[in-house]
Amino acid sequence: MKVRVRFAPSPTGGLHLGGVRTILYNYLFAHHHGGEFVIRIEDTDRNRFVEGAEQYIMECLTWCGLEPDESPVKGGPFAPYRQSERKDLYRQYADQLVASGHAYYAFDTPEELENMRKEHRKDEYSAAQYDSRTRLLMRNSLTLSAEETQQLIADGTPHVIRIKIPENTTVTLTDMIRGEVSFDSSLVDDKVLMKADGMPTYHLAVVVDDCLMEITHAFRGEEWLPSAPIHVLLWEYLGWKDKMPQWVHLPLILKPDGNGKLSKRDGDRLGFPVFAMNWTDPKTGDVNMGFKEMGFLPQAFVNMLAVLGWNDGTEQEVMSMDELISKFSIDRVHKGGAKFDFEKAKWFNHQYIQQTDDATLAALSRPFIEANGVNPGEELLLKVIPLIKDRCTLLSDFWTQGHFFFATPELKEKAAITAKWNDTKVQFFTEWAASLTNITDWTEQALEESFNELAATIGLKKGEVMLPLRIMLVGGKYGPGVFAIAEVIGMEETVKRVNSALVEIAG
Ligand code: GLU
């Protein structure tokens, strides 16, 4: 049997990193088994539908390098892959469930439902649900005669179709991560399967489509576990139990302190992204920061997510996509939630930056540099990258760690020079700057030699003038070797920075 898996997002907003991890595990599992990975858009809830969200999800997949084999964009043998375009297909299954006595028509108005919930309170706090206790008090095809029901439908009375959850039954399923999981049916309500607008709900559509699309393994977040008994019953009632996929409910990604699910608000509060890419809420215009825009390499982001809740049984953490595919197995996915650690995410990114060739880094870092209003030539960028890459954790660091190569910096740490300034140093820098025009071989080595010689002649220790030189060229106390910087920025710029620093210090 060919492995077929699906990620079935509802287009309602940004793509949370938990969603990306579910996509990734689908992808790894499919590729490991030579199977197929499908994207199906679950857009039947028109109230939650958000314009642009589907396209955004597809862009995130492309950025992560997790391309599906079948999708609304790519098409495939089970098209269409958007549930709204499959609308007409679901009704027959709902009718079949009514005919076999596992579902019923319900005509209750919103007020009637509200009254029932109030009147039949389960306890002080929670209202009653539509279930075996209350369904016989309501207006539905179980309480009305067949003629009345037919008449109401013929009159076009708004109605839904509800599943009839059996009383006092234990529904059991086998989950590949958790093993056997049982549910008491009396805790489950008679969920709506078909809405009054003719659209199926998620519960019906997910089962019908997983069956029709021949899905063999259903990966999804643990938050869907409470819905699983409804789905298991539907598979059974539709006569498809032998085709039911294997369930894989993935544990949650937790807040850094382990207290609950990682949410968008935690990211805002703690200063890190939770979405794969920037997501702009079309209603409010608010932009939520993404890992991409923060300066993550997609390979690092994906690798970090792979080991957030899974390991290969060794200490190895940095793994290529090919390694991940060959090593991935569901039995090594942890049962408990995984705490998100942003420092660890950055560690992965640093590792990947070191592994990436300079030409690729030049292309990736360019937008982060150009965002500051400079446009360095390719040759310059290729000289700078090897000098600073070991100091870069995010792609944006190619600007913060290298801005002085692309634009004349401000003398931010001037105080560190003036604290120990004297006339001998003025003389030294004035003479050194003047001598630079005579250097024919403009290299790091030649510059260092001339610097050392002059310091010795004037009677200064090299150590006394190195830090001032760095601050003159960089603006601060950081950066790679100071003569390497001078070599790259060139003679004219070096002389200019030393001389203007002398003026600024004197002033
Ligand atoms: N449409 C559901 C979601 O938005 C999919 C859940 C499932 O995979 O069954 O997460």
Image (cartoon, rainbow, N blue to C red):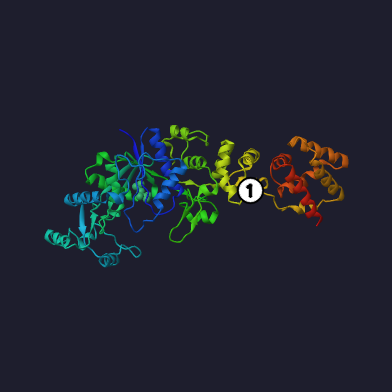
Where does residue 343 sit, x and y in percent of width and height? 56, 46
Answer with left or right where residue 14 lies relative to residue 106: right
Whether the residue carrying mark 1 lies under 8 Å from ligand 1 is answered with no
From the viewer's side, name the closer residue of 190 and 192: 192
Answer with left or right where residue 182 lies relative to residue 250: left
**SS under mark 1:** helix
Answer with left or right where residue 488 lies relative to residue 325: right
Question: Which quarter of the rendering shows the C terminus?
Answer: bottom right
Q: Residues within 10 Å of mark 1 (few under 14, many from 20)?
A: some
From the viewer's side, name the closer residue of 122 and 7: 7
The reply to whether residue 350 is visible in this rendering is: no
Where does residue 402 sit, x and y in percent of width and height? 65, 45
Circle 1 sits on which residue? 400
The reply to whether residue 368 is visible in this rendering is: yes
Where does residue 289 sit, x and y in percent of width and height? 51, 53
Number of marks in the rendered image: 1
Question: Which quarter of the rendering shows the N terminus?
Answer: top left
Answer with left or right where residue 57 lies relative to residue 122: right
From the viewer's side, name the closer residue of 440 and 46: 440
- Residue 443 to residue 376: above or below: above
Where does residue 32 sit, x and y in percent of width and height? 40, 33
Residue furthest out toward the left: 147
| Amino acid type of the residue that numbered disc 1 sits on in the rendered structure | Thr
- Residue 363 to residue 271: above or below: above
Q: Residue at x 54, y 49 (%)?
A: 294
Q: Residue at x 75, y 48 (%)?
A: 496
